[in-house]
Image (cartoon, rainbow, N blue to C red):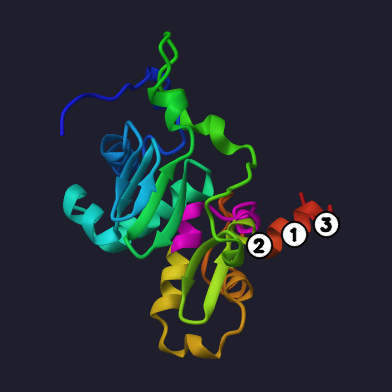
Amino acid sequence: MSGWIKLHRKITDWEWFEDKNTFIVFITLLLMANHKEKKYKGIVIKIGTIVTGRDILARQTKLSVQQIRTALNKLKLTNEITIETSPQGTVIEIVNYKKYQLTTNEITIEQPINNHQTTTNNNVNKDNKNIYRHFGHLFITESEVKKLLEIYNISQVDNILNDIENYKGNTKYKSLYLTAIKWLQKNQPTSEGISPEELKARKHGLIK
């Protein structure tokens, strides 16, 4: 592989810039993405798209598979990438790749934070409801995670989802979202450093 990619200094303002793992994964995807359309095992791989897998990315980045999954979930949540599974592997598309890499003027890679407006993802299977995370019979959608992020930070949410996945009794749960809420209320302070109960009381003007 030869060539180069463009990076703008504004990427230092990106919300994932100081998240080492997520930043490494995103840059790796930029480096590996197709810069022109081509066919791969019978499917057309568009510009800005890569066919890969968590195990492959783990080997390339020296991160664990769990770290890769968490980083991809973060990038998907903030609309930097879309992810679609296929018989050939995991198809990851960088949402604004053409804007980042294929412009001819001084505009290069604008900070990915500009992607955060809601867009229609035509590549995601309509049946998966924009799933952020799933294991066994449980799943949680991106919109549900965004509700959790109104109170908790992304690390707290991901950690509690990991705990639920590793819990042997998780087969009794019917909703990953509702279970995450209960577990977070018991185990985590909010991103403001106060309990959910205190936060609710403040919102209703019961305490200052």
Say whether disc 3 or disc 2 marks the residue closer to the N-terminus: 2
Point out the stretch of residues depicted in magenta: 146-158
Residue drawn at x 62%, y 53% is 146
Q: Does the magenta segment cover residue 154?
A: yes
Which residue is under mark 1?
200
Image quarter of residue 35: top left
Does residue 29 lie above or below 68 as drawn?
Answer: above
Q: Which mark is residue 142?
A: none
Q: Does the magenta segment cover residue 30?
A: no
Does residue 119 lie above or below 131 as drawn?
Answer: above
**Of discs 3 and 2, which sits in the foreground?**
2
Image position, residue 104 (x, y; %): 40, 12
Residue drawn at x 56%, y 51% is 191
Mark 3–mark 2 Cα distance, whole angstroms, equals 14 Å
The amino acid type of the residue labelled 3 equals: Leu
Residue drawn at x 17%, y 55% is 59
Q: Pick the quarter of the image with the N terminus.
A: top left
Q: Which mark is residue 196?
A: 2
- SS for tag 1? helix
Which residue is under mark 3?
206
Residue drawn at x 60%, y 67% is 127
Q: Is residue 125 visible?
A: yes
Marks 3 and 2: CB-CB under 8 Å? no
Marks 2 and 1: CB-CB under 8 Å? yes
